[in-house]
Image: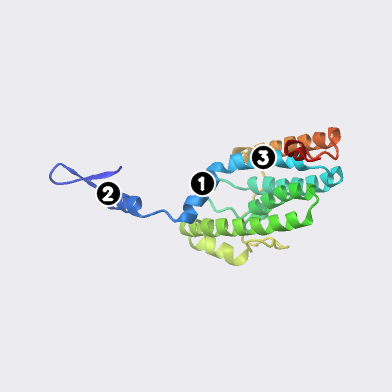
Amino acid sequence: MKHLPSSEGSSLEDPAAQDARSTPTPASERLRRQITRGRAALALLGVALLIAALRDSRAFVPGALVSLLGEVIQLWASSHVYRKDRRLTTSGPYARVRNPMYIGRCFVILGFFVMMGNLWLCLLYIVVFAAYAHVRVLREEKFLEATFGQPYREYCSQVRPWLPGLIPWSGAERRASSWAQVCINHENFNLYMLLALLLVIRLRMHFLPGVNLLSLFSGHH
């Protein structure tokens, strides 16, 4: 706890720290923090359930292509992100749309729902992801505006958040994509994990076609 020295040799608690401690954390923020801490475990659980439930091998190729498209978008975006929170990125995909990483992530996950062959699940996922991304982006844009000020406001006035423009913003940076930057941002690991997951799913469909592994545990065939 940070303290401020007093004239009598004792110490007084920093008012800002005292206010932060006494101000209750909103329920939505507590929920967000809990989800953030547990998202790795949730992702692993989701992957396990996905592999167990998949049966239709015909949906694998379309789903894999959707996921790979999303990963390509994320790789492209990551190759242009330098010094996060210190430098405003406007080159590459950011010259056409403000949130390419979220768009790419949406497609990566959507591909696995496509593999399940259920249109309603795909639509439900899109709605849930859109709500999640909207809330995240609102919070992030407040931070970016406070950090970069007028340059960011000008960028927002010229580049849409979700619908990519056909023509890149004329005021964007001119910078080439860099695989080294992808590695610095650790997006290469996401690519490797995606490829490994697709391989596992393909092998499962090849050796256990038409089998719902979840039914084996539930006792239903």
- How far separated are the C-alphas under marks 1 and 3? 22 Å
* Foreground label between 1 and 3: 1
- How far separated are the C-alphas under marks 3 and 2? 42 Å
> Where does label 1 land, which residue?
34
Residue type highlighted by circle 1: Gln
Q: Do the residues labelled 3 and 2 touch (CB within 8 Å)?
A: no
SS of the residue at dot 3?
Answer: helix
- How far separated are the C-alphas under marks 1 and 2? 28 Å
> Where does label 3 land, which residue?
190
203 versus 113 height, above or below: above
Residue type highlighted by circle 2: Asp
N-terminal of the pair, mark 3 or mark 2, is 2
Residue at 55% across / 42% down in the picture? Answer: 38
Residue at 33% across / 53% down in the picture? Answer: 22
Splitting the image into 4 quarters, where does residue 213 fall?
top right
Residue type highlighted by circle 3: Asn
N-terminal of the pair, mark 1 or mark 3, is 1
207 versus 158 height, above or below: above
Place of residue 147 in the rendered image (x, y in percent of width and height, measured from the top left): 47, 56
